[in-house]
Image (cartoon, rainbow, N blue to C red):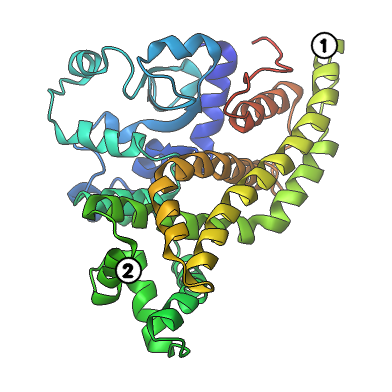
Amino acid sequence: MTDRAIRNLAHLRRSASTARVLNLLMVQKEHGLEPEWMASPLFHTPVLNRALIIKHRLRRNELDAFRARRQVATKIIIPIDTADLKSGGRYIFVGQRNFDRMMREAFGLETGHPDLNTLALIDALPSLDPFLLREQLRRSGIEPAACYLSISEGDLTRMLQFVESEVRPLVTLSLGGNDGDAASIRRLADKILSNIPGDRMEELQRTLQLRPEEYQEGIFCWKGFLYYKWVLASLADEVTAVADAVRTARPIGRPDRTAREYLDRGRHVLGDRILEVREDAARTLRIYDDAYADLTLDARPGGFRDFLLRAPRLFTSLGEQLGAIQHVVSFWRFRFAPGAPPVGVEELIDVFMDFETGLAGRDEDADPFILAA
């Protein structure tokens, strides 16, 4: 790893997990003596259970590590010294060429090991958002301790209330145009959020004429769209505030000419890019909104059926967009909170480079104004 990458790893050690980072080392440090952590680990291999899992946007020189083209990969970082992350770490991309052989040599994991299955499930998601990661694992019968995927009761309650408001038109439609009562709306919202089978959901499958596997995958992605719609609405003010803060961020210390030019350009480009990615995510969500309106307002199920069939691909794109935004907002909230130590020149450059890479478009190179490490 380069010196700059090592410094970034040290920053990750101090930060909480985000939609882009699953910090299992911090989970182990904070909860490793708790019975639930020991009884229900995310990974059965101890060294993996102390790793840092990162959704990493691939750079041009990393694309050949994979047989199929992809923009985002799941990166497993194993620190060399968990007490001093400045010593760096070893990393492997999930699904890279010779992945099975490398996991066998590095961790003794043979094909079919449950930890490889868990990594594949994590890799299939566009982000590491704890709500969606929990649901993805549950679909395969994996229930790690709650400390791995911390979701506050307040967020769960607000999410349920949001879903109830979203499904009200569907309940009304299923009742022949009569407004659904609160209990009916709550039951349908619970079924959507928990994958509980029920007659209303089965009726929807028959109406949409989808095969069971198409329907189940589409419903999971629909849940993701509902969740991301809630996330985008809840982050609206913070996204604007962070974009404004990026444009005015100043480090302590005196930057040299190259660093000053990079930071001056970075403030402008990143501030604009944060807002552009938010609008890209909003446009993707409008595809769902239009299809749902076809179903519930115009009684035309064809559009919503087409949406569910397209949903897995759209979900990936949307997850990458919102995962990048969530990471920017949550890391900025953590690192630049009131009372936090001031940021030096090199650290601010690291932060800008990290944000710029994560926010790069699917068809863009990730280094339009990169400062060499």
Judged by depth in the image, the label closer to the viewer, 2 or 1, is 2
Task: Estimate the x, y position of residue 315 in percent, counting from the top left.
Answer: 46, 45
Residue at position x 41%, y 51% from top? 130
To which quarter of the image does residue 199 belong?
A: bottom left
Residue labelled with disc 2: 204
Amino acid, disc 1: Thr
> Left of 221 or right of it: where is 341?
right
Residue at position x 52%, y 33% from top? 12
To which quarter of the image does residue 123 belong?
A: top left
Name which of mark 2 and mark 1 comes first in the sequence: 2
- All told, the count of numbered labels is 2
Residue nearest the observer in this picture, 286 or 33: 286
Task: Estimate the x, y position of residue 217 in percent, counting from the top left.
Answer: 31, 50
> Left of 323 or right of it: where is 360?
right
To which quarter of the image does residue 264 belong?
A: top right
Amino acid, disc 2: Leu
Task: Estimate the x, y position of residue 255 in percent, counting from the top left.
Answer: 83, 18
Q: Is residue 145 visible?
A: no
Q: Disc 2, disc 1: CB below 8 Å?
A: no
Q: Residues within 10 Å of mark 2 (few under 14, many from 20)?
A: some
Residue labelled with disc 1: 258
Residue nearest the observer in this picture, 104 or 359: 359
> Left of 187 or right of it: where is 265?
right
Residue nearest the observer in this picture, 85 or 323: 323
Quadrant the C terminus occupies? top right
Residue at position x 45%, y 72% from top? 160
Task: Estimate the x, y position of residue 233 in percent, counting from the top left.
Answer: 63, 60
Residue at position x 43%, y 42% from top? 128
Q: In this rendering, is residue 141 above or below 346?
A: below
